[in-house]
Image: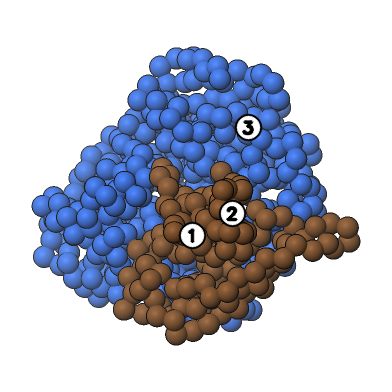
Chain colours: A blue, B brown
Amino acid sequence: MDLVRINEFVWEIPKSGEMKVPARIYASEKLIELARRDQTLQQARNVACLPGIQRMSYVMPDAHQGYGFPIGGVAAFDLDEGIISPGGVGYDINCGVRLLRTDYKESDITAKRKELLAEIFKEVPAGVGKGGITKLSRNVLKEILVRGAEWAVEQGYGTAEDLDRTEERGRMKDASWEFISDRAMERGIPQLGTLGAGNHFLEIQKVDEIYDEEVARAFGIQEKGQVLVMIHCGSRGLGHQIATDYIELMENKFGFKGLPDRELINAPFKSELGQRYYKSMCAAVNYAFANRQMIAHWVRDVFAKVMGSAKGMRQIYDVCHNVAKVEKHTVNGKEKLLCVHRKGATRSFGPGRAEIPEVCRQVGQPVLIPGSMGTASYVLVGTKEAEEMSFSSTAHGAGRVMSRNEALRRFRGEQIRDELARKDVELKATSWKGVAEEASAAYKDVDEVVRVSHETRLGKLVARLVPIGVMKG
Amino acid sequence: MEKKYEILEHMADGKFRAYGRNLGECLGNAALAMVSLMWEPERIKPEIRETIKLEATSPEQLTVKFLTELIYLLEVKSFLLGRVNEIRVEEASKNGNKTYRLEAEVSGDRISPEYEIYGQVKAVTYNEMKIEKSRDGQVLQVVVDM
């Protein structure tokens, strides 16, 4: 396959064969080497063949092989000619990140760090098969699917200000529960308000470095050592089942002949099935917003109880990094609505976009990039340039470089706990074997990923955060 | 048949190959392979039985549906699969189209502190899925999203 280097951080697969547009990859030499090792580039090329794709099939710096679409893939489709694909969103619909600020400094919580983490571990259900605290009726679930974080705030989980600082204000308006299977509903009922397992985590972090003081201040980040809390999770079994269901429905309806990969299955955006998937996906997005809203509320409760106050625990932002959205973008000098798929990519709107909260509209949207367990995470800010470069998107995290088997052979959970303890990082987990699988050495260097994002202007560096306490599901 | 399944290397997720004399046996072993990514099936006591009945338009779709059913049983009924007691796949014709019917009886136990769960399979994918004839019967390869 042809891969042309455009400049230091931009690579392109020129249009050929069935490709309707070229594919463009944002990566350093080190990261492009990793992308070459698996199917990432081929998958980016496959996406470029889909009907109605606009401009280019984009690949973010942290990309790796996914199902159908690569993880770290961004593709936008014309609403009339184009498609929507569950494989372009991913199984974990609205997997995302929420970041809370506090008025505390690291020195304020040192003595109570253990207790804070232990209490959070008690309050926030995590791990496989661990049900939520709330017993939901099906009618309440339906309301959550339609209203998302708005429902949670109304129930007393957090404040209306949280909604102002959540992508879509915590509610995608096109959501409907009507086309969601009973199975998906059943999987959703016990899991609301749970963190889950795998790469999902909750961290107490401190600010390690501030790169842009003005923007940091606009987001609520004042100084090095300031304590923050990051929550990384998604729509749990509900979203996984919706993806599985619609892959089957689309396959039964349209077949997969002619598709280079069965997981590229899709439906015309405006078709009945396309709309049903879109509305159900929006509902799963809302479920995930409500999920993170509840978890954030419990974290504040714990701070209030252990530290005496949760004053100043304002939300910095909440982003989703597995989603398809209808957004306005410019193509060939013409403004139009597109269905933008971001699978393992974060929206990165620059200053002035009406979609971002008023408080930071002057500077741009906060972009939250979680690292792997125990490593740094980053706050970036969206840019105007990203609109032209990637339909306003950037990276979403680190991405694995080592299989789970290999990680299990190399590491032991207890050993990772001890190593983190030496770095003054507290760790609580539901399974030590699970910890070994998520060892940070099994992940790409997130520092390199955000460096490329910054250099290319997909999203600019604002602050580096490092963990003090890690809770892993 | 000696080996029921083997876990393969996969960068981001879970991948395995299951063996059997026929598709049914392959699927039964694939179930054990998949749950071994989350817990040790041989440690699970056979306290509860579950029956599974499914229909699909292709062997691949049947694989996705059957394995997804086990994730459903885990998440909704807290059921940890330990053993596949019986499994049968039949081909039939429905309105001129081929369909595949599966019936299985599995046993296992409810989630409890007694059992360590170390991973989570989110979904079963078609990625790199292969169903092939082998010398002794069939081989099934599956990648699951973790």
Q: Which of A368 and B46 is in front in this view?
A: B46
Q: Which of marks 3 and 1 is in front?
A: 1
Residue at image mark 3: A46
Instruction: Report x, y in % for residue B10.
Output: 43, 44
Instruction: Tell me which amino acid carries mark 2.
Output: Gly
**Between marks 2 and 1, how big is the CA–CA gap?**
10 Å
Residue at image mark 2: B137
Q: Nearer the viewer, residue A36 or A117?
A: A36
Q: Residue furthest bottom?
A: B47
Could you tell me how many numbered marks the image carries? 3
Residue A294 image-quadrant placement: bottom left
Instruction: Report x, y in % for residue A65.
Output: 49, 38
Helix or strand or loop: what does disc 1 sit on? Answer: loop
Instruction: Tell me which amino acid carries mark 1.
Output: Met
Contact between labelled residues 1 and 2, with CB atoms less than 8 Å apart: yes
Contact between labelled residues 1 and 3, with CB atoms less than 8 Å apart: no
Seen in the picture, residue B128 relative to A201 is either above or below; the reply is: above
Helix or strand or loop: what does disc 2 sit on? Answer: loop
Instruction: Report x, y in % for residue B119.
Output: 39, 61
The residue that appears at 57% across and 34% down in the rendered structure is: A43
The residue that appears at 21% across and 43% down in the rendered structure is: A208
Of mark 2 and mark 1, the one earlier in the sequence is 1
- Callout 1 environment at 10 Å: few (<14), some (14 to 19), or many (20+)? few
Any part of residue B58 in sight:
yes
Seen in the picture, residue B139 relative to A393 is either above or below; the reply is: below
Any part of residue A164 in sight:
no
